[in-house]
Amino acid sequence: MNKPTESELEILSLLWELKEASVRQIHERLSQTKDTGYTTTLKTMQIMYTKGMVTRDEENRSHIYRPATNQQETQKSLLKNLMSTAFGGSSKKLVMQALGQDNPSKDEINEIRAFLDQLENN
């Protein structure tokens, strides 16, 4: 899959949440948080279809779009690319930077610790 732009990733996130949606439904959700035109949303989703990021059911007047890949696969691909280009392939540098940007809650720290323990035991 092609690397999604920020706008495409925003639309993919909505499609992962909704499972499927029309351009109108996506546009209504996007317009709650940003000023964007319907035709911009339509064009972006058409480009995403051409790139193979989404599938489209054309049976009805309103086309229904679905994500062509799942969220985990996309996140894994984006993270691998980010780690390679921005952190020289170092997962340690990536994690240290990520944890240094925000103050994780006690629950998040416990989850991270449990995950690290699981990695260590495998």
Image (cartoon, rainbow, N blue to C red):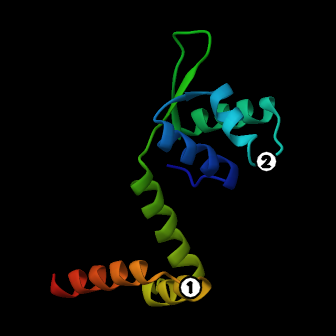
Residue 22 place in picture, x, y as percent = 60, 25
Above or below 113: residue 61: above
Q: Residues within 10 Å of mark 1 (few under 14, many from 20)?
A: few
Above or below 40: residue 115: below
Q: Which mark is residue 33?
A: none
Residue type indicated by callout 1: Asn
Query: Which residue is painted at 56% across and 43% down in the image?
Result: 14
Q: Earlier in the sequence, mark 1 or mark 2?
A: 2
Above or below 93: residue 18: above
Above or below 38: residue 31: below
State which quadrant residue 107 falls in. Answer: bottom left
Residues at marks 1 and 2, CA–CA distance in whole angstroms: 27 Å
Residue farthest along the front direction in this orientation: 106
Residue of label 1: 103
**Badges 1 and 2: C-beta atoms under 8 Å apart?**
no
Q: Which mark is residue 34?
A: 2
Give SS at disc 1. Answer: loop
Give SS at disc 2. Answer: loop
Whether residue 88 is visible, yes or no, is: no
Q: Residues within 10 Å of mark 2 (few under 14, many from 20)?
A: few
